[in-house]
């Protein structure tokens, strides 16, 4: 894997080169400065550690139920949590469920050895998709129990192509792979990877936690009152154009309020959103409880609130379906509501399932989105039936974290 390691070194050099001009590259580079001395200062050499690694914020939320149940089950262990992406680390670097949170060093053989020499984990858990060859090889060579969970495998992935032998080898390093579906098990078995089983998706456990603990937001209470409410989460410009076009028509038919939480909240994007609509609108940061009810659109200009906002929705729209793929729809359906999204959803099992079950709709344009909104918001029986489907679907898929920890072996 010399070419792979060269690619890692090139990537890090490029990130350092552009860091003065790119915020994410700067965070990526700065966060890894002096990483090994930071580890030595924060890792207790006399303690037993388990290492959890996630790529970014979404994978962290997926891993969180396992981290917290592990801590309950093994209170004598300390937890190291690493991130690859600045977008995850910067938001969760103070997560108190872990004893230390940091970036994963660049995936070179030397870094993997130094990292494991310092941490000396008794078990390692990777979440979903991050396959760092040198780290995984070194963990395997030291005979440390190594697990990955909540992953899905597909035929078109590099592991299963005719040239994928070297990439596929990394899958043999895992002590066990906890996957989401039978198709993944069959695909792995076909290629000689038999240490795998279906555990499901830990996101169901996480969204259930969030739903049960979601507190009211007084300003949002004042905004929604007794109106029908649409929550549009993780939206991108192509989504927003359709949402506002649909809303302009819908206001003539249904007493509706819109809460929109864009995926990116920089000033240019927020300003562009405001220019898309003639409906009375206000940003969350500028709204006041005494006057917010005068507006039809509430624009969320902060991070971390979306999962609680869905509790106010009669129906949700989740963005990303006109780009690389939809964002997390489980946060919405966990509140027993239907959800709509764009056309790029078929890589997401829960979206495919819910479309077939009837509590999710895929739309291609503003006319279709308007029709979906109007149909659900004017038919209480349909809305209730779709919400019940969503509720049952979430309940039927709980328990992945327990299945993983029942199978994963950790030195007592």
Image (spheres, helix red, strand yellow):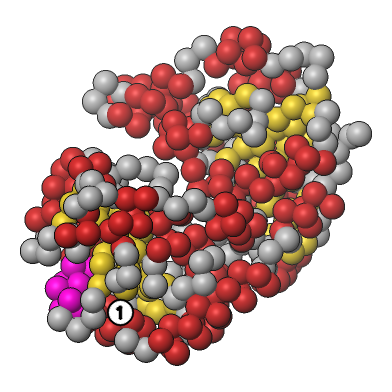
Q: In this view, does 330 lie above or below 314?
A: above
Query: Residue 50: percent from the left, percent from the top?
Result: 75, 32
Query: Residue 224: percent from the left, percent from the top?
Result: 31, 63
Q: What stretch is highlighted in magenta?
A: 242-251
Q: Quadrant of residue 64?
A: top right
* Residue at point 65%, 31% (across, down): 98
Query: Residue 372: percent from the left, percent from the top?
Result: 32, 82
Which of these two is toward me, 146 or 379?
Answer: 379
* Residue at point 28%, 29% (across, down): 22
Task: Note whether residue 31 is visible.
Answer: yes
Q: In which quarter of the image is residue 1?
A: top right
Q: Looking at this rendering, what residue extends furthest in the right direction? A: 412
Q: In this view, does 389 lie above or below 237?
A: below
Q: In which quarter of the image is residue 296?
A: bottom left
Which of these two is toward me, 17 or 123?
Answer: 123
Pointer 1 residue: 373
In the image, taking residue 229 as reference, residue 331 lies left or right, namely right
Q: Looking at this rendering, what residue extends furthest in the front direction? A: 290
Q: Is residue 34 above or below residue 375?
A: above
* Residue at point 63%, 9% (across, down): 41
**Number of on-image labels:** 1
């Amino acid at each position: 894997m010399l070419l792979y390691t060269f690619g890692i070194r090139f990537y890090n050099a490029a990130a350092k080169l552009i860091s003065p001009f790119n915020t994410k590259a700067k965070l990526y580079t700065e966060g890894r400065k002096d990483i090994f001395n930071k580890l030595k200062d924060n890792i207790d050499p006399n303690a037993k550690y388990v290492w959890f690694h996630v790529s970014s914020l979404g994978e962290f939320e997926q891993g969180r139920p396992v981290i917290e149940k592990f801590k309950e089950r093994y209170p004598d262990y300390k937890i190291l949590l690493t991130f690859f992406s600045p977008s995850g680390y910067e938001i969760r670097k103070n997560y108190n469920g872990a004893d230390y949170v940091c970036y994963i060093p660049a995936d070179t053989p030397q870094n993997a050895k130094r990292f494991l020499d310092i941490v000396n984990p008794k078990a390692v858990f990777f979440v979903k998709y991050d396959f760092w060859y040198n780290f995984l090889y070194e963990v395997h060579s030291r005979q440390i129990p190594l697990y990955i969970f909540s992953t899905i495998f597909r035929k078109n992935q590099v592991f299963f192509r005719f040239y994928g032998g070297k990439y596929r080898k990394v899958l043999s390093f895992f002590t066990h792979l906890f996957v989401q579906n039978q198709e993944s098990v069959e695909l792995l078995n076909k290629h000689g990877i038999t240490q795998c089983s279906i555990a499901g998706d830990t996101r169901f456990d996480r969204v259930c936690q969030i739903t049960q603990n979601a507190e009211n937001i007084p300003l949002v209470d004042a905004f929604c009152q007794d109106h029908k409410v649409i929550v549009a989460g993780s939206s991108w410009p192509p989504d927003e154009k359709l949402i506002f076009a649909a809303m302009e028509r819908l206001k003539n038919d249904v007493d509706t309020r819109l809460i929109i939480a864009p995926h990116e909240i920089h000033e240019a994007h927020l300003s562009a959103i405001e220019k898309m609509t003639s409906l009375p609108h206000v940003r969350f940061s500028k709204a006041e409880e005494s006057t917010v009810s005068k507006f039809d659109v509430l624009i969320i200009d902060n991070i971390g609130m979306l999962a609680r906002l869905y509790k106010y929705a009669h129906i949700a729209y989740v963005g990303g379906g006109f780009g690389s793929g939809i964002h997390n729809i489980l946060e919405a359906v966990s509140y027993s509501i239907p959800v709509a999204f764009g056309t790029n959803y078929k890589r997401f099992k829960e979206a495919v399932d819910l479309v077939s079950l009837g509590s999710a709709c895929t739309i291609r344009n503003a006319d279709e989105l308007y029709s979906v909104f109007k149909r659900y918001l004017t038919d209480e029986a349909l809305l209730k039936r779709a919400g019940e489907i969503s509720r049952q679907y979430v309940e039927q898929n709980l328990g992945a974290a327990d299945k993983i920890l029942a199978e994963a072996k950790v030195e007592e």
